[in-house]
Amino acid sequence: MAKINQSTSKQDCVVHEHPVPPEEMHRYSMVRDPSAEEDIASYVHGQARDEVVHHVERVKSEFVAGKEYEIWDVTTDKNRWWVITNGTNLYSQKHFPSLDYTLSFHIGLMMRVMSKSRGADADDPHPFDEVFRRLQQAGDRLERAVEAEEYQAVAMQLRECLLSVSSVMQRRVSLPEDIVRPKAADFNGWSELFLNHLCPGRKNEAVRKYLKAHSEKTWALVGALTHDRNAEEMPSSIAMAAVDTLVTDHLQLVMQEQVARFKECPNCNSRKIRSHFDILIEPDGEYYETCGSCDWSSHPGYEDDVVEKEGVNG
């Protein structure tokens, strides 16, 4: 039986005993997004101030119920973290070794947070707080309702909720000065005015028609229930769901004015626009946008970087 030359075998098979330092791993990443990596690193630094971030790497993205969640692997001088976006939170890999479990936990946690933040007991003030409070009160009454007059009371609370939506819109939406304003309690009049203003043009025609029809029919249904002496659970539940949908739709319309300044990349027309913050932008720091499909950025130094790269390549 032939003997194996152990010295030769050891020389031919070299085991790498020293792993690549975390701060050097970015050199070997095929696909990188420096702006997004910087945002994640800044977030971890803000959450773990006694740690120094050495490496940030996007592991993958997953879509769940129409929402994208980015999963990042972050290595610091003391720990290793999962960072998951939408909304962003970090989890120690020591306590959350399974990525799939961590993602499921994160999604559930964010659903609970969103549910709480939408309610009347939310910690942060919100322009729709009054609307949420009335909607919550209507839901509480619906759960306890038995008699017809109790279901009528639910409908009256829903009516006040709709008027609150109109009131919030009047305060939050800037309309042209020359537009004739309806009376304060004219829900349908205000609704048509806002929808024409917030969903203008042919491209929004379908959604505008839908929202108008839904608003008119919801107002009519709620009004009918307030006068129905034989009001029952089924129509009241449908009215509750209709008002909830209307509130969500109008909230989206109001908040769209706070969306990023760029809806599409001016370079490649992609909608993968992300917002970042740079404290070094004078005078007090400023947000800027980057494109997830190309290297475009609205950062003030972007044009200088492009010129510098072109000079090097030239």
Image (cartoon, helix red, strand yellow):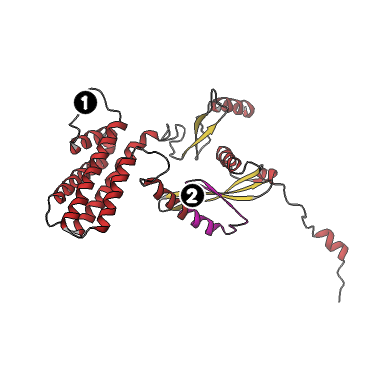
Distance from disc 1 to disc 2, alpha carbons, whole Å, reads 42 Å
Q: Earlier in the sequence, mark 1 or mark 2?
A: 2
Read off the residue under disc 2.
69
What secondary structure is found at the residue carrying circle 2? strand
Q: Badge 1, how many Cα within 10 Å: few under 14, some, many 20+? A: few
What secondary structure is found at the residue carrying circle 1? loop
Image location of residue 17, percent across then percent down = 78, 55
Which residues are the magenta region? 83-107
Residue 233 seen anywhere in this rendered image of the structure = yes
Asked if residue 102 lies in the magenta stretch, the reply is yes
Residue 199 seen anywhere in this rendered image of the structure = no
Give the numbered dot on residue 179. Answer: 1
Image location of residue 4, percent across then percent down = 86, 69
Residue at 27% in and 39% down? 165
Image location of residue 154, percent across then percent down = 22, 51
Amino acid type indicated by mark 1: Ile
**Residue 103, placed above or below residue 223:** below
**Residue 80, placed above or below residue 125:** below
